[in-house]
Image (cartoon, rainbow, N blue to C red):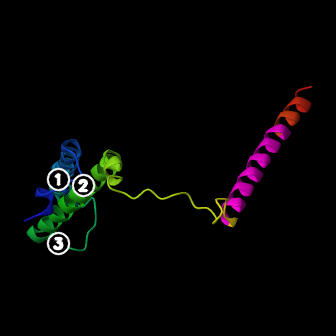
Amino acid sequence: MSRSFTPPDTLSKQEIRTIADVRRDIWTNSFHGMGYGAATGVAGHSILSFLVSREFVPLKMKLNRNTATFTVLLCSSLGSFLAATTTGKNQVHNLHPIFEVGAIKRPPLSGEDGQLSEYQKNLEQAKEEDEKRLRNRILRRKTLKASLGN
């Protein structure tokens, strides 16, 4: 049996429902994408075969049932993949609080005596230098505009 039917005890009913909703949205939109992809494949193959029969598009291969099947299957699988991926990326923000359930809280990185590590000191120094450069750039821009404006 799937683990999705027996979620861990650390999750609340609302969190379990959120996971199920996200999963359902991904599956539903995947099938919608498959349908749209199949329709696009049928339309694309029909339009291309019409253009080839009227000799608007020179094509060296023949368009037959095999190419139609290939086009429909390729477009439907591509549509399903794109729709599921897009839905997953759009819905992942609902899962962020669930990712933190049961996580071990780690203390911030520091030296043994509670002071900042060498890396953290270098990082803070680099941030301060960046802010200083930004302030100087803005100041130069203002003085340049003031001198050109007069």
Image x and y of residue 108, in percent:
55, 57
The quarter of the picture where residue 140 lies is: top right
Mark 2 and mark 3 in contact? Answer it, CB < 8 Å.
no
Residue at image mark 2 = 84
Q: CA distance from mark 2 to mark 3?
A: 33 Å
Q: Earlier in the sequence, mark 1 or mark 3?
A: 1
Disc 2 is placed on an element classified as: helix
Disc 1 is placed on an element classified as: helix
Residue 40 is a magenta residue: no
Kind of residue at disc 2: Ala
Q: Which mark is residue 27?
A: 1
Mark 2 and mark 1 in contact? Answer it, CB < 8 Å.
yes
Residue at image mark 3 = 62
The quarter of the picture where residue 112 lies is: bottom right
Residue at the image position 17 percent from the left and 72 percent from the top: 62
Range of magenta residues: 119-140
